[in-house]
Amino acid sequence: MTEAKKRSIAVVTTSRADYSHLYWPLHDLAAHPGVDLKLIVVGAHLSPEFGMTVREIEKDGFAIAGRVECLLSSDSDVGMAKTIGVATLSLADLLGELRPDLLLLIADRYEMLAPAVVALALRIPMAHIEGGEVSEGAIDDAVRNALTKMSHVHFTSTFAARERVIAMGEEPWRVHRAGAPSIDHLTRNTLHSRAELECRLEVDLGRPSLLVAYHPVTILRETTQEADALFAALAEVEGQILFCYPNADAGSRQLMERTQRFLAERGDGRVFVNLDALTYWSLLKQVEVMVGNSSSGIMETASFALPTVNLGMRQQGRERAPNVLDAAARKEEILRQVARARSAEFREGMKGMTNPYGEGTASETIVRVLTTVPLGVELLVKKGE
């Protein structure tokens, strides 16, 4: 009796951020007897400047089918554009050799345009996670929508996102509300205790602590112009301030340098170049408030009812739970919202809230669909309304 051919599924990860979302789908695909997983690692994962996070992937035990070095050591939008080009050239060779049955992409990083364009030319069907969301203040919004229209299967984080993808002309049978796969960490992992976390990070979490996750605003010509208000406000905030490194976007190095200067002058706080998913989620449970413009402050903090001050325009338009307070990029407004986030009244109002981004079962849905969706020209041909 001939053994059934395994379904070859390639997955692209570009950075620590999307890898934390992809971990459980990767784990479950690798364990599936009918899947031949091909993991492709690109971009910031291979950069020492951004923590060489490919080592985390190797430590987790995933076999890597291809490594694509494409991230230019640049702090400009031209560098971002060239990174897409370099990645496209290398991925054309790699995907041309692998020829997977399916290619799985996630979210909205600009680097994801490269594998999508290559797969389109090679007639490789694509599945996309976290389409249908809105972030008007970043080029991510356009990237996300482009990936949606190039993809053939969709896994959305929210019900509203599913309706938005269908409204873009995608056939309903292709669009599945799975939830955000990052939330699977909460249901499938045991978080570190405060004592374990303090030991790992060498910080005292018994003190009031703010976690800052702030990225360049890529829709603006001056991608760091909103940062002036952020740092001015943080200088007047009481408590310990913990920073996460920004994404590898134009302006990220300016933010890194400014963060280091701020901490040197303040003498109270830490910056983390890279936190693995379990450590990051454990930290969300321990801090008092999150401040910044990261999607994590909207998608993930809701699972802990963690008060979050969302700054500026980067996440404008994204669905949010009651734990999120929006603040314009003005010092006084940020300070007012931080004070509100710390108030007992605001915390009381969050009791019983749920996270619209999922229940922690996304990977189950993603793997079920990827291993059963019919392949062939029927999947590639998308019918209009």
Image (cartoon, rainbow, N blue to C red):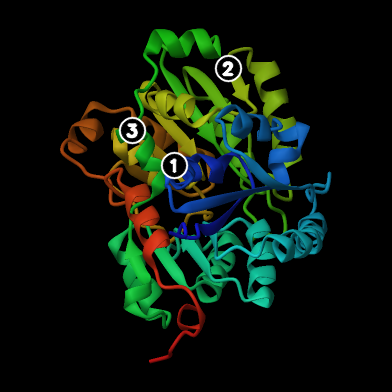
Which residue is at a point 38% across and 21% down the rendered structure image? Answer: 286
Report the Cα–Cα distance between label 2 and label 1.
40 Å
Q: Is residue 113 above or below residue 52?
A: below
Is tag 3's residue or tag 1's residue first in the polypeptide sequence? 1
Quadrant holding the C terminus: bottom left
Q: Is residue 383 in view?
A: yes
Q: Is residue 169 above or below residue 71?
A: below
- For the residue labelled by badge 2, is the local secondary structure a helix, a strand or a loop? strand
Quadrant location of residue 50?
top right
Is tag 2's residue or tag 3's residue first in the polypeptide sequence? 3
Q: Which residue is mark 3?
A: 188
Which residue is at a point 43% across and 48% down the rendered structure image? Answer: 33
Q: Which residue is mark 2?
A: 269
Dot 1 surroundings within 10 Å: few (below 14), some, or many (20 or more)?
Answer: few
Residue 39: which disc? none
For the view shown, which residue lies furthest in the left direction? 352
Residue 341 placement, left or right of 27: left
Quadrant location of residue 234?
top right
Residue 308 placement, left or right of 118: left
Rendering coords of residue 132 (x, y %):
42, 66
- For the residue labelled by badge 1, is the local secondary structure a helix, a strand or a loop? helix
For the view shown, which residue lies furthest in the front direction? 1
- Of badges 2 and 3, the one in the foreground is 3
Q: Which residue is mark 1?
A: 31
